[in-house]
Image (spheres, rainbow, N blue to C red):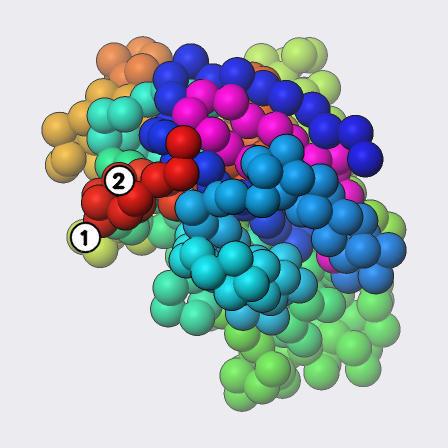
Amino acid sequence: MTTVSLDLPAAASDTKILACGAWLKNAACLLHRQHVQWSPVHGDLGDPANCIALEQSLETLLAQADGRVDAVAHDLHPDFFSTQLAVRIAGELGVPAIGVQHHHAHIAAVAAEYGVREPMIGLALDGVGLGTDGVAWGGELIWMDGAQWQRPGHLLALALPGGDVAAREPWRMAASALHAMGRNAEITTRYGEKVGIPAAQTVQTMLTRGLNCPLATGAGRWFDAAAGALDISVRQAFEAEAAIALEKLASAYLAEHGEPGRTGDYMIDDAGVLDLRPLFTQLFALADNGDAKSIARGAALFHTTLAGALAEWAEQAAKQYDVRAVALGGGCFLNRVLTSRLSADLDRRGLHVFLPQKVSCGDAGLALGQAWVAAQQLIETGADACV
């Protein structure tokens, strides 16, 4: 099986780390000093064929390491095939299996790509990754110093009516936003015609009673909610379809009309929670206008407001921790409108922005972050390395 190599600007350590990657867009890697050997991208591990491919890739990487590694790194989620495989392999080799929180790994992947060893602030934005509190995370403000990290803030959690199905149906996330805004009674009147009165009433009841509505802080779900609020997407045929459509409209509007007017409203509370509900008051009002220009303006307003809010959020944390480096990690940074505006805003605030270039900002690059953290952890604990 063909693997791809990458040399980093700085060595992680003398340790050899095998990292098993994420659930979605899975790829594994072997990290030794500054050298990274990547497996192919296997895809989502919900497909048994991709699980078999991951096993074969790990065998290939182990062979390249002469069967000697110091640790096997993996995601925190205990039910992931990649996690279970990592634990099994580590047990067979008699080395530690080191779990790395998903969003910590996203920021660590950026640090590894650039060889950054000083503390940094990270904005980790994606769809989902298991948090240390058992909640689905995905809109995270991270402080990281090697294997050490803290979470000084996160996006306001939204309820997911119906669980995973809410990630496939943006109207449900828009309904969740209405519920969070205290406007639950509008759900059926807004969405009954689009999805059927029974479905809309059921979701309204689920949110009211908190039935099968797990919480998630994922930025991807806020993108879905915006697409649903603006009537851009009701159901998605593929992952991130709604977010892509939202970005396309925003890009076209900004190119033709420039700024969408006054930046939308948001709040950052004393606990570091970034709350976008005030912005959604504006988005629903634009949707009520019903014309294409208002919808496109809403898409642009969502992007410009989110970029500004994230920049302020990161700047506050940078001052709190006395750092100047900010890393951007997670699949949401495939969005060019968000990424370009946020990078420019952070730069204007005097912060040094690190954006993935050679390594995927999404889950396909996550294994490098897992390996980097595991290597730093072994250094900190004084573990012996095989060189």
Task: Answer few, some or many: residues within 10 Å of disc 1's Cα (few below 14, many 20 plus, some between 14 and 19).
Answer: few
Position of residue 273 in the picture relative to residue 19 (left or right): left
The amino acid at mark 2 is Ile
Q: Nearer the viewer, mark 2 or mark 1?
A: 2
- Name the spot of residue 71 as percent of width and height, x first: 44, 49
Check residue 44 for magenta coloring.
Answer: yes
Among numbered discs 2 and 1, the one appearing first in the sequence: 1
Check residue 285 for magenta coloring.
Answer: no
Instruction: State the separation of the CA atoms marked 2 and 1.
Output: 35 Å
Q: In the rendered view, tell whether residue 34 sits above or below residue 60.
A: above
Disc 1 designates what residue?
A: 270
The residue under the point 70% across, 47% down is: 59
Q: Quadrant of the C terminus?
A: top left
Q: Nearer the viewer, residue 161 or 70?
A: 70
Q: Nearer the viewer, residue 33 or 83?
A: 33
Q: Nearer the viewer, residue 289 or 50?
A: 50
- Name the spot of residue 296 as percent of width and height, x first: 69, 31
Quadrant in the picture for residue 379: top left
**Highlighted magenta segment, given as a residue range:** 28-45
Disc 2 designates what residue?
A: 379
Q: Secondary structure at mark 2?
A: helix
Can you see residue 99? no
Position of residue 112 in the picture relative to residue 226 (left or right): left
The amino acid at mark 1 is Asp
Quadrant in the picture for residue 123: top left
Can you see residue 79? yes
Position of residue 337 in the picture relative to residue 132 (left or right): right
- Name the spot of residue 203 as percent of width and height, x first: 68, 77
Q: Secondary structure at mark 1?
A: loop
The residue under the point 68% across, 59% down is: 167
Q: Nearer the viewer, residue 141 or 194?
A: 141
The residue under the point 86% across, 51% down is: 237
